[in-house]
Image (cartoon, rainbow, N blue to C red):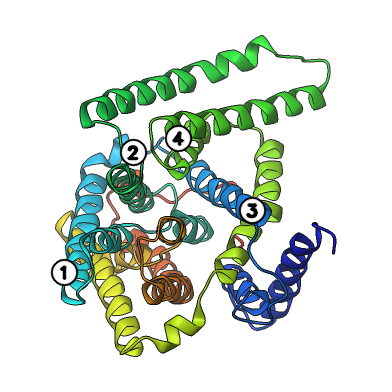
Amino acid sequence: MTEVFPFFIVLLAGLIFSRVFRSFHVPWTVALIASGLAIGPYGLQLITPDPTLEFLKYLGLVFLMFMAGLETRFSGFREVWKESSFIGTMTGLIPFAIGILIGHLLGYESHTIILLGIVFISSSIAIAVPVLEKENLFHSRLGKTIVSSIVLQDIASLVLLAVVLQYLTPGMLPFPMFVTLFVLTLFIVALVRWGVPRLRKIFENKKRSMDRFERDLRITFVVLIGTVIMFEIIGLHAIVGAFLAGLILSEIIQEKALKEKIYVMAYGLFIPVFFVMIGVDINIEAFLAAQNIVLLVLIILLGSMLSKFASGWISGKIVGFTSLQSTLVGGTCIPQLSTTLAVITIGQQYNLLPEELVTTLIILSVVTIFVSPLAVNRSAEKVRKSYFVTDPAKENDTPKETPKAPPSPL
């Protein structure tokens, strides 16, 4: 059988399942994970993971984290840095502590406990941004605070994950050398952030717009791959470099056509393969055979969702938001996507997570992707309708029209 056949099956299954599930209003990511479960070794056994598919899965994870960084904006952070820093800290530390406590009570090993805590820290900017844009709240004080705090949560979880992996995986560098190389890498990244706009001017060709598009696309991939390589050299996982590359380019890439092409390339090929392969790797037999599995799922779900919502609501109230606005803050903290799936992938790669916990964390991601948009959409609509009543004196809170972004496939 041709070596391309497994790749064809992955693409075909993702295409069919996403189309069928769309009729039932099931999120795109859930459909892709389900397709992988159906065709994998624990389903119809149409494919088994091989080096080619694993590499494509790796690329999909890199692009997923890159797009998460690319969707981030720091332009409004200065205006709300106090509120967003406090909310980001509260919605990171409290869930982290709850995750550590749950892992300890469940009797997991220390590295599994820490990874579970890291999962509880993270949220998903990809869920929050489309809702805020839809309700014209993205440029408001509330919207900027929400986005900035989620970005801080994701950065904190990724940095902590990178440091933990430095100690858990083979080839660990001495700590002083690791810190030195890490700081040097960040300096190089900052230099790239400064140099990319100037590099574009050097290769500027005003005669042909297609030349400019091709140039910018090549520069984008050079920055992405180069940043990933730098972080892997010092022993950090590629996801950190990919997310940071997205942050570097988020304020630099201005051309709408380029953003759309990158979006189509990422969500049209690489990221779907990653989600399908997540489903392929789910060991449903080990999950069903685990003792007290229903209790495990309930504990993880309730622990994550309640700790994220409660910490977001409380911190929102403390910084001066209304109860309704604080409900929106708490709701946007609930979804688990990029970092959670990154932890799952890395945990499988280095055998750091038991199979039943891997599947439980996938269920956590699936459920929160379902639940959070429902609650967030409802809260955001109410906030928009009551905005001028709750904050009539704040000119900076006036919602502005936001340019239309490509629709989120999530």
Pair 3/2: label in front: 3
Q: Residues within 10 Å of mark 1 (few under 14, many from 20)?
A: some
Disc 1 element: helix
Q: Earlier in the sequence, mark 4 or mark 2?
A: 2
Residue 51's disc is 3
Q: Residues within 10 Å of mark 4 (few under 14, many from 20)?
A: some
Quadrant of image for the N terminus? bottom right
Q: Earlier in the sequence, mark 1 or mark 4?
A: 1
Residue 207's spot in the image, x, y percent?
A: 83, 15
Residue 160's disc is none
Residue 400's spot in the image, x, y percent?
A: 48, 48
| Type of the residue with mark 1 | Leu
Q: Is residue 175 left or right of residue 265?
A: left
Q: Earlier in the sequence, mark 3 or mark 4?
A: 3
Q: Are marks 3 and 1 in contact (CB under 8 Å)?
A: no
Disc 2 element: loop
Distance from the alpha carbon under mark 3 to that under mark 1: 37 Å
Residue 410 can be seen in this image:
no
Pair 4/2: label in front: 4
Distance from the alpha carbon under mark 2 to that under mark 1: 32 Å
Disc 3 element: helix
**Which residue, given by chain and number where applicable, does mark 4 sit on?**
232
| Type of the residue with mark 2 | Phe
Q: Residues within 10 Å of mark 3 (few under 14, many from 20)?
A: few
Residue 290's spot in the image, x, y percent?
A: 37, 86
Residue 90's spot in the image, x, y percent?
A: 19, 56
**Which residue, given by chain and number where applicable, does mark 1 sit on?**
101
Distance from the alpha carbon under mark 3 to that under mark 2: 42 Å
| Type of the residue with mark 4 | Glu
Q: Residue at x 35, y 89 (%)?
A: 294
**Which residue, given by chain and number where applicable, does mark 2 sit on?**
77
